[in-house]
Amino acid sequence: MEAVAKIPETSLWANRKCLLICAIVAIANMQYGLDSAAIGSLQAMPGFLEVFGYKDPSQPSGYAIEGTFQRLIGSLLTLGAFLSSLIAGAFAHFFGRKVALWLACVLNAVACIIQISTTDKAAVYVGRLVLGLANGFLVTFSNIYAAPAHLRAVMVALFSEWVNIGSIIGAAVTNATKNRLDKASYQIPLGTLFIVPAFLTIGLFFVPESPRYLLYKGDSETARRSLKSLRGDSLSPEDLELEWVEMVKGIEEEKHTASTIGPLDMFRGTELRRTLLCYGIIATQTGAGSWFIISYSTYFMIVAGLSVDDAFKFSVMNTCLGFIGVNVGMYLMRHVLGRRSVLMIGAVTQGFAMLGMAVSATVAYGTLPARNCVIAFTALYQFCYNAFVGDATYPTATEMVSTRLRSWSVGSAISLGYFLAWLTGFCSPYFINPGDLNWGAKYAYIWAGSNLCCLVFFYLCVPETKGRTLEEIDELFANRVSVRNFKTFKTTIVTEALKDVGGRIPGSDKLATAEHVDKA
């Protein structure tokens, strides 16, 4: 078979330093898991409802919550994240990504203090909005950090890993405090939101800035040191030089094709396709129905007739299943399947889980079998979402966009995702709340159809990028390669980089060549 140039694939152990650095940055996403578990559970907690709800003997917990308050505590968080993600590109351009993460840690601490110390609903709204502003920066900048091509899915999938670790901690804490009738029942879970800012603030002092970002800022010397810090232990000096030259050539090529770096460039030429793909992939997180399940699963199970104790226990169980699913998905993306296949399998399995939930509520509403089906299909959904779409969307979306526009493109895409999440969080209570439409589990019909739409989008529009360097992906989009040919198209940038390296290093003519292997 034809020999082609490529940068060697090294093991996770060989890249342990890079993995540790990416894990430190990715811990920012743990905040999302902690908050989702806490807020989703607080809405079913008597101690919280005694302060912010009202007595209702007809409810299993003895208390109920107003639909408006329920909608706002969820939607204001996503509104804040929407706003901060929208300006993430501009902020990074002027101040850098690490500064953005430090600022998010400060805002996070302020928001936690507000929420813990108040019994006023208006103050809670302010705290949720400020926490959302922090979360937007945390999620955006922790998901665009550099990683080797063959390990990028694993590194970026640490997002889901930390989200689920946060969810497990949050679910365990709320389960431990759920029977308390004082303010500490909700103040203790909210106190866990200090964990991430504390760890991240210290950890960022040991994290180098992304080498590609530094190259675009014109600081090549610091960029080279950053690359050596990230990859120097896993590659030979010759292969490290090849990766550096490929990175420099790719960025120089991008600079030649554009005279400016700004938000409007996302919608010009070949960048338009890349931006729309990134937007579409991030939007499928909401389209999969994840925000509905994550935000309201505990409350939803209580409305379906479960006791408070049982609902919290199943919530912890589902969170643990999600964590198992994340690790299954990481293995599949690393060793078995491509990004596109993982996404399509996820859309199918999630759609069937939603359909099963809705059908059971239709044919056996209010019965024990229907309640058991809600529990079973919710658990199945949590596993499938975290193993497939939840795991693969961020790796795939961040690969779609060019390096020079990554902060702008990913930031605005995440902003769109938060807007859709806000819309879901605002509308869902109206569908499931007994005081409104009272659809209950039949609301899942909408999400079954939405998953079908996601499947069509993944099949027709999303190309396979597994095993490609970011510079190779730039070349593929520049050549307007179709979805069908994306996987097999032979790029030339590594070969050209190898020629540039030739003569500088002895034996470089034998460097980084291997038989072409079709990567599934």
Image: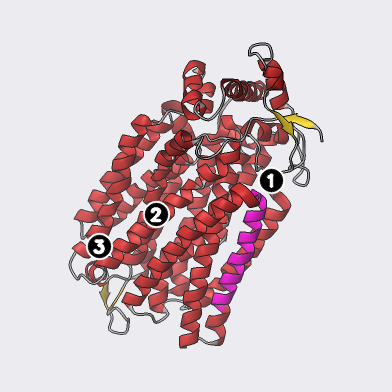
Tell me the mark number nearer the camera, choosing from 2 and 3.
Answer: 2
* Percent of width and height locating residue 247: 60, 25
Task: Provide residue 173's location: percent of width, then percent of height.
Answer: 29, 61
Q: Residues within 10 Å of mark 3 (few under 14, many from 20)?
A: many
Q: Residue furthest left?
A: 182
Q: Amino acid at mark 1?
A: Glu
Q: Is residue 282 left or right of residue 309?
A: right
Marks 2 and 3 sit apart, C-alpha to C-alpha, by: 20 Å
Q: Foreground mark, 1 or 2?
A: 2
Above/below status of 377 relative to 109: below
Q: Which residues are magenta?
A: 337-358
Q: Which residue is mark 1?
A: 464
Task: Give me the C-alpha separation between circle 3 and circle 1.
Answer: 44 Å
Q: Residue at x 51, y 63 (%)?
A: 383
Residue that badge 3 annotates: 186
Q: Which residue bears the numbered disc 2?
A: 165
